[in-house]
Image: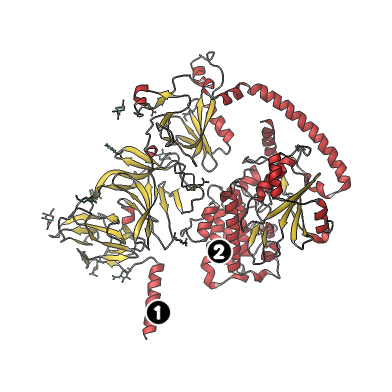
Amino acid sequence: MNISLLSILIIFYSLCLHYGIAINNITLSQSINDPETLSSNGFTLGFLSPPNSTNRYVGIWYMTESTVVWLANRNQPLRDSLGSFAISEDGNLVVMNGTKKVIWSSNVSNIATNSTCQLLDSGNLVLMDSAGDKVWESFKNPTDTLLPNMKITNNNKSGEKVELTSWKSPSDPSIGSFSLSIEPLNIPEGFIWNKTVAYWRTGPWTGDVFLGIPMMNSSYLNGYRLDYEEDGTVFLTYSYSNESYLAVFVLDWQGKFEQRFWDHEKKEWQVGWKAQSSECDVYGICGPFGICSVESSPICTCLEGFEPSNTEEWNSNNWTNGCVNRRTKLQCESAKTQNGSVNSKEDGFEKLEMIKVPEVTAFSWLKTEDSCRSQCMENCTCIAYSFDEEVGCMTWINNLTDMQQFSSGGSNLYIRLANSELSINDNEKDSKTTIITITVTVIVGTIIIVTCAYFLWKRSARKRKRDEFSRFNRGETIVVNTSDMKIEEQSEMELQELLLFDTETLSVATNNFDLSNKLGQGGFGPVYKGKLKDGKEIAVKRLSKASGQGLEEFMNEVVVISKLQHRNLVRLLGCCREGDEKMLIYEYMANKSLDKFVFGPPEHKFLDWGKRFNIIEGIARGLLYLHRDSRLRIIHRDLKASNILLDEELNPKISDFGLARIFGGHRDEANTARVVGTYGYMAPEYAMEGLFSEKSDVFSFGVLLLEIVSGKKNSSFYNNEESQSLLGFAWNLWNEENIVSIIDEGIYEGMKERDILRCVHIGLLCVQESARDRPNMATVISMLNSEIVNLPQPKQPAFIERNNIINSLSSEECLVLFSNNIVTLTNIQGR
Ligand SMILES: *[C@@H]1O[C@H](CO)[C@@H](O)[C@H](O)[C@H]1NC(C)=O
Ligand SMILES: *[C@@H]1O[C@H](CO)[C@@H](O)[C@H](O)[C@H]1NC(C)=O
Ligand SMILES: *[C@@H]1O[C@H](CO)[C@@H](O)[C@H](O)[C@H]1NC(C)=O
Ligand SMILES: *[C@@H]1O[C@H](CO)[C@@H](O)[C@H](O)[C@H]1NC(C)=O
Ligand SMILES: *[C@@H]1O[C@H](CO)[C@@H](O)[C@H](O)[C@H]1NC(C)=O
Ligand SMILES: *[C@@H]1O[C@H](CO)[C@@H](O)[C@H](O)[C@H]1NC(C)=O
Ligand SMILES: *[C@@H]1O[C@H](CO)[C@@H](O)[C@H](O)[C@H]1NC(C)=O
Ligand SMILES: *[C@@H]1O[C@H](CO)[C@@H](O)[C@H](O)[C@H]1NC(C)=O
Ligand SMILES: *[C@@H]1O[C@H](CO)[C@@H](O)[C@H](O)[C@H]1NC(C)=O
Ligand SMILES: *[C@@H]1O[C@H](CO)[C@@H](O)[C@H](O)[C@H]1NC(C)=O
Ligand SMILES: *[C@@H]1O[C@H](CO)[C@@H](O)[C@H](O)[C@H]1NC(C)=O
Ligand SMILES: *[C@@H]1O[C@H](CO)[C@@H](O)[C@H](O)[C@H]1NC(C)=O
């Protein structure tokens, strides 16, 4: 009897938790009188007095009465403790004084019928009409505290705004002079205002982080979102689902904005991040064209090429009027006034690094830094630009205000200057541009011709000897052979740390590269199983010879890549280079590759959902390490099931990472000379334009995830009439609200359905057409761990219909030289 009652209670309680419904509501007939309270999940609604004040206010606090997260009658205090909080006859929430006079009201007009009010677990106080629709909520009428899932919004059409407003003083909660809002600029930013004067800004939003908050860098994992609603309202929100602490943001009475965590053990608040940590964080402290750095003294300096507009003031540390450029006119301006002869050299750009950039006056979706630069160069009103992979091309036409020099993070900012103002290096470079261009063209031309000839000769000679290596040569025309180059001493030292194998040893270990030892054929060459004399098993990747790299560069890359170590990456044990032969030696993985398990019939059932989820998560962690945590920011570019190896405990390990570096040579080119990858896993922007970024790996990850969950190979859809691809298939099911049927029957478990579907949802988010819409790996991991609870709706994935361009490629041809990339390649060589 007791037990069953208890279990009913437990079920009831967990249901309540589950739906976020507290057992805390008032209806028309009830009211709360001072000092009664309602509470829910640590939040309490009741009457309180701020420190050093006898006024009473109706408010919500968390854990202790001193941490007030919301107040009703902040501007209309109760003078005594006879007040009450109730729903009035017109359906509104009201605060009444001792003589039942309404002093505060939620002031919603025309509430249809009898309304009720609840304090939810999230700390949100909602007023619902009898149909259960929210007609008013405290989350849309905040005071000075931002709680998880609350939205700061701004609609510049209707002028509707939800913003935080500070208290007047610690003992007076009425509206003070500071507010925090989100501004719908070209690229939205958060601002703190002192009345109408800007006091602090976040910097432009990149889609993941704010550029002006260095601490909020890419390794920041906490569900922040800034986005548009359909009606054009821009909103900022964040979610936290770590049950063990609550994190809130507070705008205090002095305009300071900080994050606080509730420490359950010590029962107190801990301060996390602070928006204003130095004087430099005060908006525009150095005036126009001034730049602030905490490390210099005085903190303000003028930009290169600029000088104080009032030297006396400036020297007495009054920087309000900032700096001007009155030294040399820009060439583009002189040309405009037909005075071009005075200074006829073309303007240039001075590069500043790790900068908090000013408010963006214009931006465009240019994909490369070069196009951004030339767009700015072409228009004389453009005085600066900055390029960010996630944002695009930002340009400025007005005063540059509120710049800060960071010691980490921030962006590169390029300032337009007259040629003579540029620092020596740039200047010389520019003045010699023509000569250099000609010389480079001639030299490069010669090198290309000579090396091509040499290469072709060598290739034909080699072809007679061994057929195998010529297989991957297609498309590669410009190869600089530098095998005679000496390896620098330093890297020779580093090589000592890495095991160097000789061809002899490897030949013996693999039984002279016998076909029976061949484990597979990767994009860069065949892989053989080998056994060293001491019995240790290894995998040997024999690189095809199409590598566009010299020996020295090859060795450098190998050393660098061998330093990447993570439990979800296959370890590189060593390498071998002898003559033309280049081989990489990896640890051997007993359980082969993932495709055999997921798609192969006998082992099919072997991987249940738990194991599959573990694999998905492991791959995500490995990728995140490659993208973010390792110093190198490696983009894999060929992630697929056959590149995921499994160890004895079925932990996934990513293989073949970094090979694009070994093969590409051009480290930071976002526009690759050669598209490496496998049809079906390649992101659209990569397959068609050769543009790669972390987000193209995210795309491949999404495809892989859907394959793992569905047990279906993406390529198995090639000849399917109904859907042209796995993505199309999944998207159709999603729209038919029948996504459950994508789940591999072998792993379906009723209990786990929600988790599995959540994974599918994440997969769909990863394969969205626009790279910008796809989450990054950090966010993917937060989503997988349910740190981010509410997933956005996925947009249509890429390749629903098979694209004609792609279609015309056979799947064999995974190494492709696209025509527009030949142009890029030429550019690279010409620099
Ligand atoms: C609170 O509201 C819920 C849902 O509207 C209702 O089921 C419940 O009975 C109410 N509780 C009280 C104490 O009024
Ligand atoms: C309250 O008043 C006392 C005495 O005037 C003062 O020391 C204290 O700092 C005040 N507290 C607050 C929060 O203002
Ligand atoms: C309630 O408010 C009314 C109007 O502001 C005022 O006249 C009245 O004295 C107040 N009653 C109490 C008990 O404060
Ligand atoms: C209540 O709303 C009306 C219009 O909807 C407005 O005129 C009035 O000022 C509001 N009152 C308060 C106290 O906000
Ligand atoms: C509101 O609730 C009261 C009491 O439950 C009921 O008498 C009244 O008819 C309801 N009013 C409406 C408009 O539903
Ligand atoms: C609202 O914002 C958009 C985008 O930034 C802008 O194009 C538009 O002019 C703005 N409208 C108003 C009324 O400010
Ligand atoms: C806010 O502005 C007022 C004047 O409007 C000024 O006195 C005050 O110092 C400013 N506060 C801060 C923190 O800048
Ligand atoms: C990110 O921010 C953290 C904390 O400020 C810092 O320790 C870390 O070095 C930063 N990472 C990068 C890549 O800037
Ligand atoms: C929540 O935070 C605590 C304390 O920082 C940490 O120990 C715990 O691992 C976190 N839990 C989750 C699920 O992230
Ligand atoms: C700084 O200069 C401005 C403009 O010349 C002046 O209005 C202001 O009072 C000065 N500020 C200080 C602190 O001297
Ligand atoms: C230059 O930029 C300004 C501001 O963005 C724009 O109004 C103007 O039309 C541009 N001029 C040209 C020639 O593109
Ligand atoms: C730029 O700054 C100067 C000096 O403070 C000011 O006179 C001018 O109005 C500003 N121009 C713009 C467009 O903000």
Of residues 291 and 451, which is closer to you in this image? Answer: 291
Disc 2 to disc 1, how far (Cα)? 34 Å
> How far from the left and from the top, in percent, is residue 520?
76, 58
Element under disc 2: helix
Residue at 58 percent across and 64 percent down: it is 613
Q: Which scheme is used to colour this image of the protein?
A: secondary structure
Which label sits on residue 761?
none
Residue at 55 percent across and 31 percent down: it is 373
Quarter occupied by the N terminus? bottom left
Q: Is residue 775 above or below residue 37?
A: above
Would residue 133 be found to the left or right of residue 814 on screen?
A: left
- Residue 810 in sight in this render: no
Residue at 67 percent across and 45 percent down: it is 661
Q: Residues within 10 Å of mark 1 (few under 14, many from 20)?
A: few
Q: Is residue 797 above or below residue 476?
A: below
Q: Residues within 10 Å of mark 2 (few under 14, many from 20)?
A: some
> Mark 1 highlights which residue?
7
> Mark 2 highlights which residue?
739
**Mark 2 sits near ligand 9, with its Cβ under 8 Å away:** no
> How far from the left and from the top, in percent, is residue 179?
32, 44
Amino acid type for the residue under numbered disc 1 = Ser
Of residues 612 and 792, which is closer to you in this image? Answer: 612
- Residue 348 in sight in this render: yes
Mark closer to the observer (2, 1): 1
